[in-house]
Amino acid sequence: MNILADQFLYRIRDFSPDGCKCTLFDPADGFPKYASSFDALLIRTVTKINHETLPFGGNLKFIGTATAGFDHIDRTHLNNLGIAFARSEGCNSNAVGEYVLTSLLKWAESNRQSINKLRIGIVGCGYTGTAVNYYLKKIGFETVLYDPPKAGRIPAFKSAPLEQLLDCNVLTFHTPLTTSGKNKTLHLCGKEWLDNGFKLIINSARGGVVDENALLNAKEHGTVDDFILDVWENEPDFLDEAAKQAFIATPHIAGYSREAKFRASEIVIAKLCKFFGLKRSAVKFDAAPPDVKQPKEKTFASFLWENHQISLYHRGLRELIGLSSELKSSQFATLRSQTETRFEFASILKKSSENIGFPKEAEIFL
């Protein structure tokens, strides 16, 4: 069997089942025109699947995305072509949880905001929103969970009313991007929501869930103090002014960690094997994390910031401001794919068997 895979999928050839030939492609070259000659195609969010990119299926029987999100996939089109689809749901939830916790605590410390005076509204309570809620609750934040679609599917889950959500100080978004229907999320957070006033808006879900023009207007008029953006409406051609004014601006890397990428490849290959009736290859996560870094300031926020790579990506993205759309888009993709991927905190901390040199709060990761 022949598999065509994005070359940036973590250890994808190691995961490929015995007897399968795995050919790699570079997404920077555009959609692989020869994809329909393969049995399976494995991609990331940078590769769009629709009628234009894949007008006919050819030999393709299975397309898998090694990502939690799937708004880059026209699933109706795939269904019409008779091609099975799978994604790696939940693969990056812990990584995103760590990103939100780290960036939120950095903002709070920089602005002298007390944890016990902040109420965090979590919009979207799937794998990622649940991970975010876990970490925030563990260190003492009050959280409000808002996910009406989930409440409609799962009676045991209770979504807060909108009025309670909009009474929060901070909103963080963890929904897919949907452009139609009763629960569409395109510009979910627009002027109507932002006029309620917030200290901080965080979007690490999908560009367009937060209306960036409305967000900039709200900041200009003082109804929003700050915002953190990891995703962008016209990604990778992000809005310069939004990147300039963001407290933190990163290139869609909240879910990027070695562990998340490992899980993403593992999950999508498991689904491929199940579909084709193949035996999975046993692959062990054996990457060696770096030593714990000790910040000058002995606070949990500083510890997280020092041992994360948010600042590296933030500086890199800021350097792209003002470039032409073509060059900016190219460099955005390079920044995402070629920066050395971080490790999650659990891996870093476990390297220190005696738990020496890090704050007690870090035990939430172990």
Image (cartoon, rainbow, N blue to C red):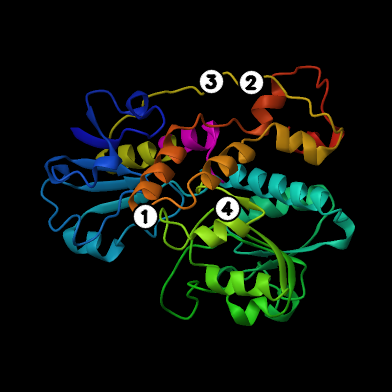
Q: Write the start and end of the magenta stretch as one range.
A: 254-265
Amino acid beneath label 2: Pro
Question: Badge 2, how many Cα within 10 Å: few under 14, some, many 20+?
Answer: few
Whichever of callouts 4 and 2 sits on the residue coming sooner in the sequence is 4
Which label is found at residue 287? 3
Query: Which quadrant is home to the N terminus?
Result: top left
Q: Position of residue 52 (x, y in %)?
A: 18, 60
Residue 203 in sight here = no
Residue at left 49%, top 59%? 232
Amino acid beneath label 4: Tyr
Mark 4–mark 2 Cα distance, whole angstroms, equals: 27 Å
Q: Which residue is mark 2?
A: 290
Query: Which quadrant is home to the C terminus?
Result: top right
Whichever of callouts 1 and 2 sits on the residue coming sooner in the sequence is 2
Q: Which residue is mark 1?
A: 325
Q: Nearer the viewer, residue 40 or 119?
A: 119
Residue at left 58%, top 68%? 154
Whichever of callouts 4 and 1 sits on the residue coming sooner in the sequence is 4
Residue 160 lies within the magenta run: no
**Secondary structure state at the residue bearing disc 1:** helix
Q: Nearer the viewer, mark 1 or mark 2?
A: 1
- Look at the magenta stretch and give its main secondary structure: helix
**Secondary structure state at the residue bearing disc 2:** loop
Mark 3–mark 1 Cα distance, whole angstroms, equals: 36 Å
